[in-house]
Image (tube, coloured by chain):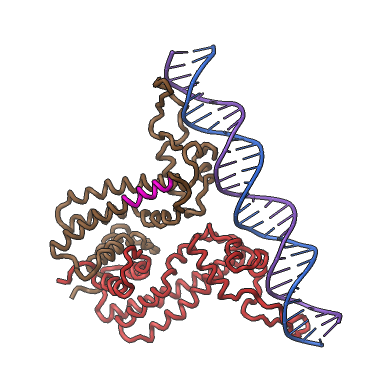
Chain colours: A brown, B red, C purple, D blue
DNA sequence: GTTTAAAGTGACACAACTGTCACTTTAATG
DNA sequence: CATTAAAGTGACAGTTGTGTCACTTTAAAC
């Protein structure tokens, strides 16, 4: 059973306000630690023991909120995805394709681990329990919503006669999202890096002829 | 201690030829299973138990060849990298930048998991034992060699006045390698997929003006 | 057939993670 | 100050993985 993790105020059977003992960690603490440990150890390497140590609570305490790690991880992903989607929808406020492209690229760079997280999400077995299945279904719904939003973005690019029509939309979107995963082994300054990435996405590696 | 895994013929102290019992699995069986399980479960999820089950031998038998999974994994990676490098060096036999680019892209698509494997390689702790450290050092040497080979490829592109000089080499190479990792969610046919990716890398998503 | 040495087995002790639960702590409420 | 209920704890049993080792199996060599 998942309890309200936001509000500490709860009500007993008679509807009388009661205050519980103060939490040792906030929802943000929990999700931040989850993210960090997931990226560090991967899905199979992530454990409640690691998480409990990181948050400085006992392992048992975590089971008050989640029955197992799948439930926690999908819940965290849902949280991240909802934040990302909220931001992404602001793209429609930008005028013109190139403005929207700039916006999208900056957004993706500020959520640069989303690609890794999607992969980790795919590793989670569906049949763990009902809650996990619900979370995964919800995540799929959000992914679809994201795709629809980005289709509008590409549609604008085509209307403005800027996009090469012979390249499938899926390739363009995949290419844009994948770009944040390119490892900057030589520590090229961030501004140069982003500018170069943008140039590659727009015009490729060849000299304009 | 790592024994010869290639030849079954061994010699005793007096130099007399002796034949050992036949192996239940070949080096290829071993590495193929290792690859598959690594890609499926990731570094931390990979275990000797899984591997032994997959090869249909006892766990104990594996310890005859490798002291631990780090030793096995780095050995497998070295093997893959050496194969890849051998193939890559054939790039110099191709005439002209565009020919070489075609060759490189095809090669990378045929080793499409190399990107994932490099990431997994980074997760292996260095200080496990001497053998692991040696393998990792050797891997680094091969990565450098690979980079040098690719620098020649880019140099040719610049000499032929085809490459945009304002884009850092690391970005171009990063893009080429990363492109195989773009997930083909909509199952676009392979030939269309590769052609589109190539078009993106060469000229970007914008219409040529 | 006997010898030899590698290949393979299964059991052991140890360590880590899981899920549960009775119990303690805390702080607001009455 | 007694009550309440959530927050948190630590111990327990169960499972899975680790590394080792004495032992058995195999097949060539003599």
> Residue B176's x, y, as percent?
34, 70
Q: Nearer the viewer, residue A23 or B23?
A: B23
Which corner quadrant of the image does residue B130 belong to? bottom right
Q: Considering the image in quadrants, where does the C terminus of chain A appear?
A: bottom left
Residue A1 covered by magenta stretch: no
In the depicted structure, whether residue B160 falls above or below residue B115: below
The magenta-colored residue range is A131-141
Main SS category, magenta section:
helix
Is A163 left or right of A66, judged from the image as shown?
Answer: left
Please tell me which residue lies in front, A134 or A4.
A134
Q: Is residue B195 above or below residue A44?
A: below
Q: Is residue A110 above or below residue A207?
A: above
Q: Position of residue A124 (x, y in %)?
A: 45, 53
Residue drawn 36% across and 57% down?
Answer: A115
The image position of residue A205, as x and y in percent, is 27, 71
Looking at this view, is A205 or A131 the one in front? A131
């Amino acid at each position: 059973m998942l309890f309200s993790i936001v509000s500490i105020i709860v009500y007993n059977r008679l509807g009388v306000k009661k205050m519980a003992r103060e939490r040792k960690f906030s929802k943000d603490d929990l999700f931040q630690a989850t993210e960090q440990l997931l990226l560090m150890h991967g899905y199979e390497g992530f454990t409640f023991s690691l998480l409990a140590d990181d948050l400085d609570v006992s392992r048992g305490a975590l089971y008050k909120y989640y029955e197992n790690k799948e439930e926690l991880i999908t819940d965290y992903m849902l949280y991240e995805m909802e934040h990302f989607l909220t931001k992404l929808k602001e793209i429609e406020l930008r005028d013109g394709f190139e403005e929207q492209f700039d916006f999208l690229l900056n957004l993706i760079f500020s959520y640069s681990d989303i690609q890794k997280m999607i992969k980790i999400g795919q590793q989670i077995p569906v049949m763990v329990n009902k809650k996990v299945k619900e979370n995964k279904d919800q995540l799929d719904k959000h992914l679809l919503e994201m795709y629809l939003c980005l289709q509008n973005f590409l549609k604008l690019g085509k209307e403005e006669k800027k996009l090469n029509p012979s390249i499938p939309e899926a390739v363009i979107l995949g290419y844009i999202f994948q770009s944040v995963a390119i490892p900057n082994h030589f520590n090229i300054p961030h501004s140069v890096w982003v500018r170069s990435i943008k140039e590659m996405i727009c015009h490729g590696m060849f000299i304009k002829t």
